[in-house]
Image (cartoon, grey):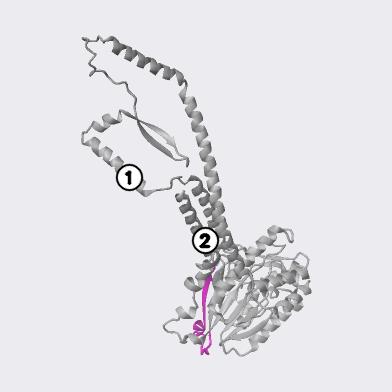
Amino acid sequence: MKQHHKLTVALCGIWAATLLYGEMFSFWVPSLWSCSWPHLQSLSSNSTINGVGNYVKVAVIADPQIMDRTSHHLPPKSFALETAQFYTDLYMRRAFLLSILPFKPDVILFLGDYFDGGPHLSDQEWQESLQRYRHIFAMNSEGRYSDFQVYSIPGNHDIGYASLNSHKPEVVRRYVEGFGIRNFQFTVGKVEFIAVDAQTLDGDPQGNLASMTWEFVKNVSKDIQLAPRVLLTHIPLYRRDNTDCGSHRSSPIINQRISRSAHSQEITYQNFVTEESSNKLLELLKPALILSGHDHDQCTVTHESNSIPIKEHSVGTISWQQGNLYPSFMLLSVSNSAQANRSAAEDALISQLCFLPMQTHIYIWYISLYILTLLTLLFWPASGISFERYLSGLMGYIRLYSSMFKGGTKEKNEDENFEYEEMWDAEGTMHLVKKPVNTPTSCHGDKASVGRGNAVMRPTARKNISQEMEISVNIDGNTDPNIKLAHRTSKSKTKIIIRRLMRTFRMVVVIAAINIPIYMMLLFKDWIDQ
């Protein structure tokens, strides 16, 4: 029984360590081990900028796309939907609180797609989603932070594509009320950031939304460019089909696909901004770097404008429910020193992609560990696994074989006078018991045996006859012993199975009683507002 207690304690420890890692420690890995601000590790030897204080720290987050009734077509307020929403929201909240905030960013950029079915939600549903979004990212009631600045650009899941937002102005209106204007510019350090509403770039040029976006771009282009520019767009710019996305890509490359309304010919879906609009943006704004989302997977490509290479980073989704097994975010170090020329702009903007825990793999490990736990409890020997017993058994075999090779036959002759019987103890363990064989004793030493040759005296003969009668009676009294043995063995095996099932149930209850409270505390530790 002590072996069972040791096994239970060991499994409790394994489960506790697994839960602590899967629910907490794994989210500490980016800040403690796998990621750091790029200006701390990537400053080149010929960098024109020196000193840690010369950089502003910017964290970039894309495509939270929080789940709602449009996500998996589940009934509103159903248990399945609310469970999926809880675990998806919890993952992103942990990613933000435990993985991103420990880096202590000065600015946070959100690259769009905050809701999944934003344009199709009622006003009440949209407000509920907005409150969830602010809770996930620990914002105040106004969607702001006290410690750092936050900037947000719209995505297609927030206001729709050109064909929708031009016919549903109320969708754009409530987005502006919740997140702010769609096209704007701001300065971080000595770098200028230009945010555009990419969903309207390829809309009807005569339409109000598209014309406002292009008017904003043209006005910015008229300004004298004294600092490097970063273009923020939810939809990536055009690239040729099958363009390589770099080593961080985990899913197949997505090529350009554009769908248009049969009636108005306005865009209902697009993977990238059209080639014409992309070239126009690059020519007017002349950015040194482009940040985008929309793709849900990591992608790094290089564009060219007037023979000048311009790098674009499409940041992967922060959610584990959006088709990317490797959610991520980006750290961007922005120069706080003036740049004299374009070549120095490479030092002004240094990026580092950071990966979050693989939640799907964590849940697969939970399921695997649960199955292994059950199998271990069911088939673990009742007397436990003793290495001393195995060692002594091995030494016994070695001694036996060594005596046989030495030519000694005494042990062999002695073994012929014994038999082995299987015995089962109360715990269900089988033991081999060595018993002497009952053989009739010879009478060579009997003084009454005086006959010659094969003649035997009468008293001895009577004795032998009585022994034979006794043996024959015993055999007759135990007719068909195999049937009784099989019946006894069957009952014994049934008892063993029942005992093992009961033992497994008791041990599972103990393991669950210790680890379920740990799991619940870990869940609500991060969910409840501090």
Residue type indicated by callout 1: Ser
Q: Earlier in the sequence, mark 1 or mark 2?
A: 2
Q: Is residue 224 left or right of residue 210?
A: left
Residue 69 image point, x, y percent? 72, 62
Residue 353 image point, x, y percent? 52, 72
Which of the 4 quarters of the picture holds residue 402? top left
Element class at badge 1: helix
Nearer the observer, 125 or 159: 125
| As drawn, 349 above or below 482 | below
Residue picked out by circle 2: 16
Element class at badge 2: helix
| As drawn, 194 above or below 457 | below
Nearer the observer, 294 or 237: 294
Q: Is residue 352 magenta?
A: yes
Q: Is residue 399 left or right of residue 41?
A: left
Nearer the observer, 461 or 211: 461
Count all numbered tags in the image, as a single digit.
2
Residue picked out by circle 1: 392
The answer, for residue 375, to whether it is visible in the render is yes
Q: Is residue 295 magenta?
A: no
Residue 286 image point, x, y percent? 59, 82
Residue type indicated by callout 2: Ala
Of tags 1 and 2, which is closer to the observer?
A: 1
Q: Which residues are magenta?
A: 335-356
